[in-house]
Image (cartoon, rainbow, N blue to C red):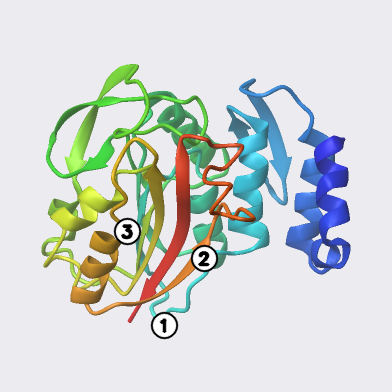
Amino acid sequence: MKLFFKILSKDFYHLLRDAGHREFLRLAFRYGDTPRYQARKVRFLRYQVQVPDTLSFIWQFREIFAEESYFFGVNNPAPVILDCGANIGLSCLFFKHHYPLAKIIAFEADPNVAALLTENLRQNGFSDISVIAKAVWTQNATIPFAGEGADGGSAVAGKASMQVPAVRLKDYLHGAGRIDLLKMDIEGAEVAVLEDCRGSLGEVQQLFVEYHAYTMQAQRLDTLLTVLQESGFRYFIRSEADRPRPFVNRFNRSTPYMDLQLNIFAYR
């Protein structure tokens, strides 16, 4: 209930302006105070999904379905989408909602979350999405991975709790032809992966990347933006974790191990 009233008081009109935001408000009211990291089935819009953590799900829903951050214009009725870091499948459901004939390859590193992704797509009738239960990386290998149990598992940050198979994204881009959207939410591995993909992004029409800067590592936003510029993209940047008085508040209270998180939208 606390989360519900906090959200409601922030921008009442904004939250009631359309069906997506009203559904977000309903989900916050229904699940906002449920204990974290307890799996449960959740119904929203016309879908039903199994979620490992309701709070993560609520914020994912807001970004993907209410704010429609991944919506893009395309003339092709069957756009090609590479979804790197597909988590439990909300992004895939959103893509199929707007682009029913989309050809989607969904990558998810955490084996437990990948199992939920596969089951959620099956339960909602999407058997034409290719799920690859592997991390997106700079080489085909087995790499250490820090599973978080929801949407924060990482191959580059945190204490590794398992070994997971990884695939080189560059191999999927090379010779693939036009890719209408490349979405990357891979919890800190984005700079290394995009740097490895230098010279192979020419057929990517639109690219979303969530940039993470962890306090124990050097910030490499300049490298990421250089790769985008060299590949012919323009970009728009939105802060995902703003904070007041940043000279004093150098860390986000909710994520003290991270001092910068950005959503970057690149397009031609």
Element class at badge 2:
strand
Location of residue 138 in the rendering, given as x and y in whole percent from the top left corner: 15, 44
| Above or below, comparing residue 122 to residue 82 in the picture | above
> Rounded to the nearest whole Å, what is the CA distance between mark 3 and mark 2?
13 Å
Q: Amino acid at mark 1?
A: Asn
Looking at marks 3 and 2 on the same chain, the residue that comes earlier in the sequence is marked by 3
Question: Total of numbered circles in the picture?
Answer: 3
Q: Residues within 10 Å of mark 2 (few under 14, many from 20)?
A: few
Q: Earlier in the sequence, mark 3 or mark 1?
A: 1
Residue 180 appears at what percent x and percent y?
A: 34, 70
Instruction: Kindly report which numbered mark, 3 or 2, lies closer to the viewer in this rendering.
Output: 3
Residue at the image point whose x is 37% and y is 26% from the top? 158
Say which residue label 2 marks: 238
Dot 3 falls on a residue whose secondary structure is: helix
In front of the other: 93 or 158: 158
From the image, tell me which residue sits under label 3: 221
The 10 Å Cα crowd at callout 3, few under 14, some 14 to 19, many 20 or more, is some
SS assignment at label 1 = loop
